[in-house]
């Protein structure tokens, strides 16, 4: 097992030295696939163009653990979200990933939306989610007293949860690496020379040539471009930008559930949700773009969000904003995943994975390995994965600065460096020494929450940077 960020890739040129499987793309889906493959005695590589796992769409989603109540019944996405949601909830408990089952309320703001709620309840039932029920305006007001005026009712969707979106791909990658997977970061694949019968594929990367018998495309926004490298042109990815606003933890008392709109043609629409980190999210927008790197926020987008947020939860707009950010989802023009196996190429594409990819990730991993087996990959006997336990970043469980016994054993957990998020020197030290250490201050933030609070690093930035530079020297 290894994690590399520079230097020449391992020599895979000799007969028998090729990887059995290479997964390209280390977002939450690619990491989940690599973790699933690690159950078998295979030589597996996880290759990522950027310097860290979860650097693309995975780092900027709405952090919802979906039940799949509103998926298209009968679709692959509906099945994998339903299965994956259960799997991720169990995995989070095992791996120490923060989850809060706050439930959701699908709020109707006009008669047309109110009339749509029974249809959505029926859709939920067809997706195997039978717990939904209509909520009157009076009950809705009692359950969400800060809701804006005019709400006519809602659909109660129990089971919807919020989850730590940063620790999830990191846990998968950590467990995969500890179980024998090679993770190669800063390793963009520029060309593919497809292999023939008995001949491995050759991936031409910036760090050399990598040979592999089977290949998985988990490239997210670039899944169609990678498909083209192996001669496939099955779909086109349209980047769909979602801008979000993060409100300070003082706003947390204003909202008890995930407040969802009645979905429209561009997706689930703008929601307001608490987060496991103790603050509140407003967003996302849904803007189809041409630029796959356009992750900047815009004045127009933020103004639109504020207008919608003011209608849903007026008092929220009086609270302090901690941050704004934007992410890109991989829209493909259909309401289902674009997963395809090509046994003749020993190749599987896992494309069109939109905002539900976090929830479905473990089921996507299992489904992909089944497709690889159908395409001829001999898995052999299954073996236990190496254990993993992630540091708790959620506010619902004690954090290290609150743990007197832990501080007594190791005073570094009592030395707070980031006072907004109460991140200690011990947590930063641990992250820098972890199996998949951060390559940047942003990576360190996703592992500890350092610099993610209301001052955005204004107060602690120099100290955090000094620790980062010391730890990566």
Image (cartoon, rainbow, N blue to C red):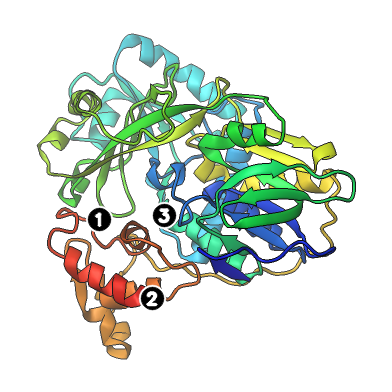
Q: Which residue is mark 1?
A: 452
Q: Tell me where residue 337 appears, x and y as whole percent.
A: 61, 31
The residue depicted at 41 percent of the width and 12 percent of the height is 115
Q: Residue furthest bottom?
A: 409
Q: Residue at x 37, y 62 (%)?
A: 447
User: Which residue is denoted by mark 2 in the rendering?
Assistant: 430
State the SS at label 3. Answer: loop
**How many numbered circles does the render carry?**
3
Quarter of the picture containing the N terminus is: bottom right
Judge the density around disc 2: few (<14), some (14-19), many (≥20) Cα neighbours within 10 Å.
some
Is residue 278 depicted above or below 464 in this figure? above
Of all residues, the one furthest to the right in this rendering is: 197
Q: Is residue 328 left or right of residue 219?
A: left
Q: At numbered mark 2, what does the secondary structure look like: helix, strand or loop?
A: helix
* Closer-to-camera residue (73/465): 465
Q: Earlier in the sequence, mark 1 or mark 2?
A: 2
Q: Which mark is residue 166?
A: 3
The correct choice, above or below, for 185 with respect to 232 in the image is below
Looking at the rendered image, the quarter that the C terminus falls into is: bottom left
| Front residue of this view, candidates 427 and 134 | 427
Looking at the image, residue 452 sits to the left or right of residue 387; the answer is left
Q: Earlier in the sequence, mark 3 or mark 1?
A: 3
* Residue 394 visible in image: yes
Relative image position of residue 64 (x, y in whole percent): 42, 42
Distance between mark 1 and mark 2 Cα atoms: 18 Å
Which one is in front, 327 or 472? 472
Q: Is residue 438 left or right of residue 422?
A: right
* Horizontal side, residue 460 vs residue 113: left or right: left
Please tell me which residue is depicted at 26% across the width and 33% down the height of the picture: 297
Q: Between marks 3 and 2, how big is the CA–CA gap?
A: 16 Å
Question: Which label sits on residue 220?
Answer: none
Q: Give residue 319's quadrant in the image.
A: top left
């Amino acid at each position: 097992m290894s994690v590399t960020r520079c230097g020449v890739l391992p020599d895979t040129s000799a007969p028998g030295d090729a990887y059995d499987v290479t997964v390209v793309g280390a977002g939450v889906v690619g990491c989940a696939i690599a973790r699933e493959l690690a159950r078998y005695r295979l030589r597996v590589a996880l290759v990522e163009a950027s310097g860290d796992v979860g650097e693309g769409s995975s780092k900027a989603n709405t952090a919802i653990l979906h039940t799949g109540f509103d998926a298209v019944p009968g679709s692959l996405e509906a099945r994998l979200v339903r299965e994956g949601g259960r799997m991720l909830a169990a995995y989070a408990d095992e791996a120490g990933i923060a989850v809060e089952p706050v439930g959701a309320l699908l709020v109707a703001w006009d008669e047309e939306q109110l009339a749509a709620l029974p249809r959505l309840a029926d859709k939920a039932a067809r997706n195997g989610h039978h717990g939904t029920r209509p909520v009157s305006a009076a009950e809705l007001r009692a359950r969400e007293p800060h809701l804006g005026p005019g709400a006519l009712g809602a659909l109660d969707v129990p089971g919807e949860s919020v989850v730590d979106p940063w620790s999830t791909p990191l846990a998968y990658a950590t467990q995969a690496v500890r179980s024998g997977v090679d993770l190669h970061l800063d390793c963009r694949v520029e060309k593919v020379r497809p292999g023939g019968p008995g001949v491995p594929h050759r991936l031409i990367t910036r760090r050399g040539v990598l040979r592999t018998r089977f290949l998985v495309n988990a490239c997210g926004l670039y899944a169609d471009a990678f498909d083209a490298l192996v001669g496939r042109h099955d779909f086109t990815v349209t980047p769909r930008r979602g801008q979000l606003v993060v409100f300070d933890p003082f706003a947390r008392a204003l909202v008890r559930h995930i407040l969802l709109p009645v979905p429209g043609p561009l997706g689930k629409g703008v929601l307001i949700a608490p987060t496991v980190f103790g603050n509140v999210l407003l967003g996302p927008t849904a803007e189809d773009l041409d630029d796959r790197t356009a992750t900047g926020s815009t004045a127009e987008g933020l103004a639109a969000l504020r207008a919608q947020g003011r209608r849903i939860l007026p008092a929220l707009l009086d609270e302090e904003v901690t941050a704004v950010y934007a992410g890109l989802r991989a829209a493909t023009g259909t309401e289902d995943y674009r997963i395809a196996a090509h046994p003749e190429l020993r190749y599987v594409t896992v494309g069109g994975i939109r905002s539900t990819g976090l929830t479905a990730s473990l089921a996507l991993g299992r489904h992909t390995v089944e497709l690889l087996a159908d395409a001829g990959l001999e898995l052999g006997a299954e073996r236990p994965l190496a254990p993993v336990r992630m540091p708790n970043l959620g506010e619902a469980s004690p954090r290290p600065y609150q743990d007197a016994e832990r501080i007594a054993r190791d005073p570094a957990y009592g030395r707070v460096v980031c006072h907004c998020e109460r991140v200690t020197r011990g947590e930063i030290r641990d992250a820098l020494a972890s199996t998949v250490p951060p390559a940047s201050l942003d990576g360190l933030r996703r592992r500890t929450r350092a610099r993610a609070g209301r001052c955005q690093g204004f107060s602690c930035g120099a100290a955090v940077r000094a620790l980062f530079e010391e730890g990566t020297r």
